[in-house]
Image (cartoon, rainbow, N blue to C red):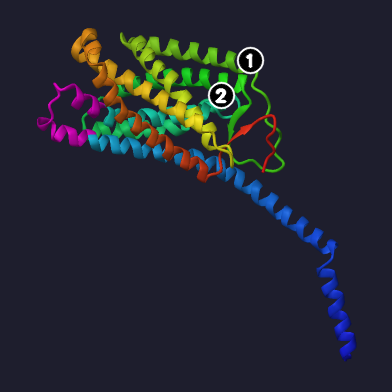
């Protein structure tokens, strides 16, 4: 049996070891190894979680839009479609949610740091299921023609992709910012954006435009022009809020201010088009104040969708990072 003195000496030795630097180094090393393993496992969860969540958010937006359209069809006799304000608010309620959601998904994919064809695949993975729901449910509930919707989807995606890609690649090429999901500690550094990405973009657009022309649609050029203008205005808004909100502890208020400006321009473009269709160009000039006032409603809708989308990416630890200084966490 141990004597009291021996027992006390053992306790003293154990206590001294627990308080030593050597023990602290062993504990820290073990914790760091566990953290690295956990981060390696969660990096893929971050990527797939963000992509799948954005896909589900798009599907939810589409279902809400279809519900609104169905209600409007049911109560159309109560709506005065000759009034510009009513028409503009109705159109914005129906269209701006899905349109800015598509812009966010496309811009998110184009602002990603991987190869261009992977960005296209990522955008298609997020948008295609929502379009399928839109076409199937719309065909069942609202008697839409699937082929017509397919042509519309092709026009929207080609235009949105092209102008979102141009804007995103330009930001990545001339600045240090890019988008990434949570990365493992042993992940390779993020490389710069080369001119090859722009050549890939040119080839993709040439093939896509040839396919669109082969559809033999008279209004395909007008569709590309309209949605191209939408993509050119909405993409800077999305990239602005990505940089503003996904930079870790720092905040960039100007990003949200820029997003407000570009969203307001998008809404004004939509409402200006409606005014020209209803009243001609002279009517637009006479109702500029009303167009701008109604556009505030559309701007608020788009900013709300952007905020919700940002919260989704934050939940899955997506980051907007400085390629020159970024170290995987």
Q: Position of residue 21 (x, y in %)?
A: 84, 61
Give yes or no for residue 295 being in the magenta stretch: no
Q: Quadrant of the C terminus?
A: top right
Q: Residue at x 56, y 30 (%)?
A: 112
Q: Residue at x 36, y 27 (%)?
A: 99
* Residue mark closest to the camera, 1 vs 2: 1
Neighbours of disc 2 within 10 Å: few (<14), some (14-19), many (20+): some
Q: Position of residue 77 (x, y in %)?
A: 9, 30
Of 319 and 46, which appears nearest the observer?
319
Q: Secondary structure at mark 1?
A: loop
- Tell me which secondary structure the magenta stretch mostly adopts: helix
Span highlighted in magenta in the image: 69-91
C-alpha span from label 1 to label 2: 15 Å
Residue marked by disc 1? 195
Q: Position of residue 116 (x, y in %)?
A: 57, 23
Residue 89 versus residue 30: which sits nearer the camera? 89
Given contact means CB atoms under 8 Å apart, are the residues at marks 1 and 2 in contact? no
Q: Earlier in the sequence, mark 1 or mark 2?
A: 2
Residue tagged 2: 117
Q: Residue furthest left?
A: 77
Regarding residue 158, the answer to whether it shows in the image is no
Residue 166 shows in this picture: yes
- Assess disc 1: are there few (<14), some (14-19) or many (≥20) residues with their C-alpha within 10 Å of its C-alpha: few
Q: Is residue 55 left or right of residue 119?
A: left
């Amino acid at each position: 049996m141990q004597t009291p003195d021996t027992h006390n000496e053992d306790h003293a030795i154990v206590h001294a070891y627990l308080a030593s630097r050597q023990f602290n180094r062993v504990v820290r090393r073990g914790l760091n190894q566990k953290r690295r393993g956990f981060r390696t496992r969660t990096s893929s969860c971050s990527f797939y979680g963000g992509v799948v969540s954005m896909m589900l958010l798009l599907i939810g937006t589409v279902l809400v839009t279809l519900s609104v359209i169905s209600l409007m069809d049911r109560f159309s006799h109560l709506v005065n479609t000759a009034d510009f304000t009513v028409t503009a608010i109705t159109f914005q309620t129906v269209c701006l949610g899905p349109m800015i959601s598509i812009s966010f998904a496309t811009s998110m994919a184009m602002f990603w740091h991987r190869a261009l064809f992977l960005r296209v695949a990522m955008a298609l993975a997020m948008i295609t299921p929502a379009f399928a729901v839109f076409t199937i449910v719309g065909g069942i509930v609202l008697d839409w023609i699937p082929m017509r919707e397919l042509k519309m989807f092709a026009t929207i995606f080609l235009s949105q992709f092209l102008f979102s890609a141009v804007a995103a690649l330009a930001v990545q090429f001339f600045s240090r910012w890019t988008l990434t999901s949570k990365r493992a500690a042993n992940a390779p550094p993020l490389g710069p954006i080369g001119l090859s990405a722009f050549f890939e973009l040119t080839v993709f657009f040439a093939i896509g435009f040839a396919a669109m022309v082969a559809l033999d649609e008279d209004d395909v050029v007008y569709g590309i022009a309209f949605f191209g203008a939408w993509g050119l205005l909405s993409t800077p808004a999305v990239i602005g809020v990505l940089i503003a909100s996904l930079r870790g502890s720092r905040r960039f208020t100007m990003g949200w201010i820029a997003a407000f400006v570009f969203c307001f321009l998008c809404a004004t473009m939509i409402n200006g088009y409606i005014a020209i269709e209803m009243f001609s160009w002279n009517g637009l000039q006479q109702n500029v104040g009303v167009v701008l006032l109604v556009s505030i409603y559309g701007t608020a809708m788009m900013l709300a969708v952007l905020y919700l989308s940002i919260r989704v990416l934050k939940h899955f630890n997506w980051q907007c990072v400085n390629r020159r200084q970024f170290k995987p966490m």
